[in-house]
Image (spheres, rainbow, N blue to C red):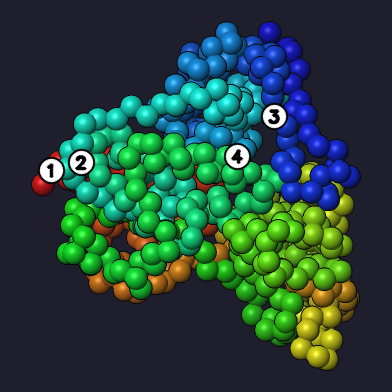
Amino acid sequence: MSKIPRVKVREQDPKVRAANFEEVSFGYNSEEAILEASRCLNCKKPLCVQGCPVNINIPAFIAEVAKGEFAEAAKIISEDSSLPAVCGRVCPQETQCEGKCILGVKFEPVAIGKLERFVADWSADNGIQFSEKAAPNSHKVAIVGSGPSGLACASDLAKWGYDVTIFEALHRPGGVLEYGIPEFRLPKDKVVAREIENLKNLGVKIETNVVIGRTLSVDQLFEKEGFEALFIGSGAGLPKFMGIPGENLNGVVSANEFLTRNNLMKAFRSDYDTPIYVGKKVAVVGGGNVAMDAARTALRLGADVTIVYRRTEKELPARVEEVHHAREEGVKFEMLTNPIEVVSNGEGWVKGLTCIKMELGEPDSSGRRRPVPVEGSDFFIEADVVIMSLGTSPNPLISSTTPGLDIDKRGCIIADESGVTSREAIFAGGDIVTGAATVILAMGAGRKAAKAIDEYIKSK
């Protein structure tokens, strides 16, 4: 059965979807899922499991899909993942589980992510829930941040009987799932809200509009609120800029701000009065997944969009699928190009970018060839909005208000693989420790920290 070609996923037509915020992919139906699952070799030593940061028993759940036993497949996934509908949509499977698939050596790998999404969506549509949990153990644990790492940590602890409360700074839980990833890749009401509701069914409490470090300090959570352990999963939401002339002009925004206005504040909907300005021409500086999200969002809001990236397409850090979708929809790419100045229109607003062409030199510390400026190659790109998508670092609020918590030179909290920090009873994981990474890696860190918290409290 391995010679069956990979079942392609049906998608919206590029010209149609470029003008709406509905999900791009329609996902598999039952027949397509069963056919795709039948391609799995059921390896004796499944490398795909090793490639998954939360170690889902991938061959077992796929075998159940192949038999049409979707509920059983969902039960297997639920043992290791609290966000299957999310991970099935946004995880970089091509470099993780699918990248390890033995079938992929000679043929296309099994569409593990698409099958996970199918199982999660089928379960939701059919009212299937797995919320088995231990009896309450009277121990209280606080979680700071309701993004992927916090949700994963809370899920495991709740299943083990802990009294868990998540503290979220914004008015809706979900972290980057809610404010960062666009609706057309991750529907909020259909997927994110549903996954969070599953967490609440486990007994997890979520308090929004609480800024730890301002509303409450970490010390107050221990001393006044009675928590015995705390997990920090507040992510890395502080945007980076280039430090070039003109970055303070009106019309220059970070990708974080742009996507937050559009997603969390529903600026893309006509029934929400949220200001968002895209102008006629938008330049997005950067080449990661966030840059693709910002570019495709600006395009849907009516702008002519160009991505400006200093290396070649081969070095783009974004997923191949996201780059492909962006091109299909009409996003332009200006490769081997680096901005050196944001140019003013003389009235305090952006007129465009002065850029310089680049060529690739020797590899840098990341292993990618270092871009080197080409002398005398300056040119101008017209734009009335410039979106900077150059990565993020942790907000220093928690670390600066929590004595005894060590951080590194990037501002990240220092923690070991289990999430143990320099201060007793405080654990951390996800982007707050590693810097900006993927949803599934953050989830893996949250699960490891949950285990460490359980061991810590039981040892007291």
Residue at point 73%, 32% (across, down): 26
Q: In this view, does 374 lie to the left or right of 410?
A: right
Q: Examine the rendered structure and indicate whether residue 380 appears above or below residue 133.
A: below
Query: In the image, 156: left or right of 227?
Result: right
Q: Is mark 3 on a helix, strand or loop?
A: loop
Using a 10 Å C-alpha cutoff, classify the residue at mark 4 as few (fewer than 14 neighbours), some (14 to 19) or many (20 or more).
few
Q: Could you give the CA–CA distance between mark 4 and mark 1, rounded to whole angstroms?
A: 40 Å
Task: Determine whether label 1 and label 3 are within 8 Å by CB.
Answer: no
Dots 2 and 1: beta carbons under 8 Å? yes
What's the distance in space between the residues labelled 4 and 2, CA to CA? 35 Å
Q: Residue 45: x, y in percent?
A: 48, 18
Residue 354 visible, this angle: no
Name which residue type carries label 4: Lys
Name the kind of residue labelled 2 in the image. Glu
Distance between the Cα atoms at labels 1 and 3? 46 Å
**Label ID, residue 27:** 3
Q: Residue 248 location in percent, x, y?
A: 67, 84
Q: For the residue labelled by badge 1, is the local secondary structure a helix, a strand or a loop? A: helix
SS for callout 4: helix
Choose mark 4 or mark 3, whichever is in front.
4
- Find the residue positioned furthest to the front: 271
Residue occupied by mark 2:
455
Q: Position of residue 364 (x, y in %)?
A: 62, 61
Which image quadrant is residue 305 in? bottom right
Choose the circle earlier in sequence order: 4 or 1: 4
